[in-house]
Amino acid sequence: MAKKAYNDMSTAGNKPIPAPAIRYQPPLPRRYSPPVALIGCGGVSTYHLAAYRAMKLNVVALCDRHPERADARRKEFFPKAKVYDEPRQLLGRDDIEVVDITTHPKERAPLITAAIDAGKHVLSQKPFVLDLDVGERLAERAERKGVKLAVNHNGRWAPHLSYVRNVIAAGLIGEVFAAHLACHWNHEWIESTPFNAVHHIVLYDYAIHWFDILTCMMPDQTPRTVFATLARAPHQKAKPPLLAQAILEFDNAQASLLFDAAIVAGPRDTGYIAGTRGSARYEGTSLTQHAVTVNTEKGHFAPKLAGKWWREGFMGTMGELLCAIEEKREPFNSAQSSLAGLAACFAAVRSADSGRPQQVGKVRKMR
């Protein structure tokens, strides 16, 4: 009897079924097309601006302390935009309604505050803040001022991750009780960049995407503790440790994140998510294309996905903010929603530094 029950469970979902209609692509407003400005024209801004050009947004101003850099972005993406080297000048324009702030975290909080006080809706680059208390105050400030504050968690709209989280939201695999996500790639490109000085470049700056997506995949579960480790690969040239992992403990669930950032050949990106009614998994050789399979009690399906993380992901964060403004609601990627992932990430960083598990929510700042 026990063996038969095991066999029945192991073959559940083996029947192929058509993939249901799941909305996973970036949301776009129906009519709202406000003047948009961007502050911070560093490397990541190219992904923002390429997405906004594809969305046909009305980007009217670009700002950077190095005006030649802002002008280069203007020429490449939005030739009619005006260039500024001082944020106050840009924020003083009454016509600008939405500001995308892509600077580094230390510089970002004062700019977000100034933009909110100027009555602008704001999209903040990730990681949102270096202090959870500051993040909460910014979210509260935006609410008091009647503006929307969202975070550029573009992983939420990466096609494979967006599809899986919407499968979960639709209840197709039940309540998630386990999620195991792993990335194997080469991050040695940072050696000749300022990122080489960031000790937690993997566990913080990179892994925040995965800590954040876990909060979307497990919306009804809150992690209690995190235990994380760091190590150097024997052949790596970059200064920060490129091997990191984190185990998250819940009351009735578990999750793990694994990052091998010194892979010489054969990159791989995978995820397995188990729920009370089924499971979902994804696999790819990069962050741009993945195969997704969903197993349910009725059968399994494998959708054909369109889009790439570095386009649709950035379209999604701004598109959701614009939709929220148009529909007078909070954006799915609100500042408040980003704090849960940050809390887990901060605890993981402290755990890796201390060698001990850390309680999620107790670690309020990045050192």
Image (tube, rainbow, N blue to C red):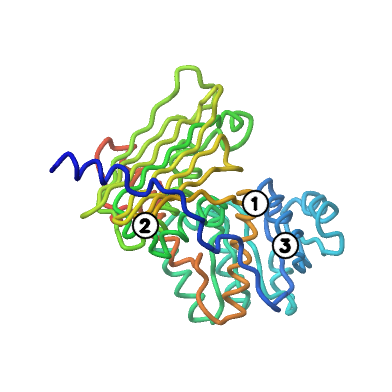
Residue 77 visible to the viewer:
yes
In whole angstroms, how far apart are the C-alphas of marks 1 and 2?
24 Å
- Decide which of 52, 167 is in the foreground and name it: 167
Position of residue 205 measured from the top left corner of the image (x, y, whole percent)? 50, 44
Which of the two residues, 118 or 360, is positioned nearer the viewer here?
360
Considering only vertical position in the picture, is 283 above or below 28? above
Residue farthest to the top, as pictured = 235
In depth, the one of 68 and 43 nearer the eye is 43
Q: Please give left or right for residue 63 compared with residue 273 in the image.
A: right
| Residue 110 placement, left or right of 165 | right
Categorize mark 3 by other alpha carbons within 10 Å: few (<14), some (14-19), many (20+). some
**At 70% from the left edge and 56% from the top edge, which residue is drawn?**
51
Amino acid at the residue labelled 3 = Glu
Q: Earlier in the sequence, mark 2 or mark 3?
A: 3
Give me the disc on residue 173.
2
**Residue with the mark numbered 3:** 86
Q: Is residue 346 visible?
A: no
Disc 1 marks a residue whose amino acid type is Gly
As helix, strand or loop, the secondary structure at mark 1 comes to loop
| 250 horizontally vs 211: left or right | left
Question: Which residue is identified by label 1?
Answer: 307
Q: Secondary structure at mark 2?
A: loop
Q: Nearer the viewer, mark 3 or mark 1?
A: 1
First-in-chain label (1 vs 2): 2
The CA span between labels 3 and 1 is 35 Å
Instruction: Note whether 197 is above or below 226 in the view shown.
Output: above
In percent of width and height, residue 334 lies at: 49, 67
For the view shown, which residue lies furthest in the left direction? 1
State the image quarter where residue 272 is shown. top left
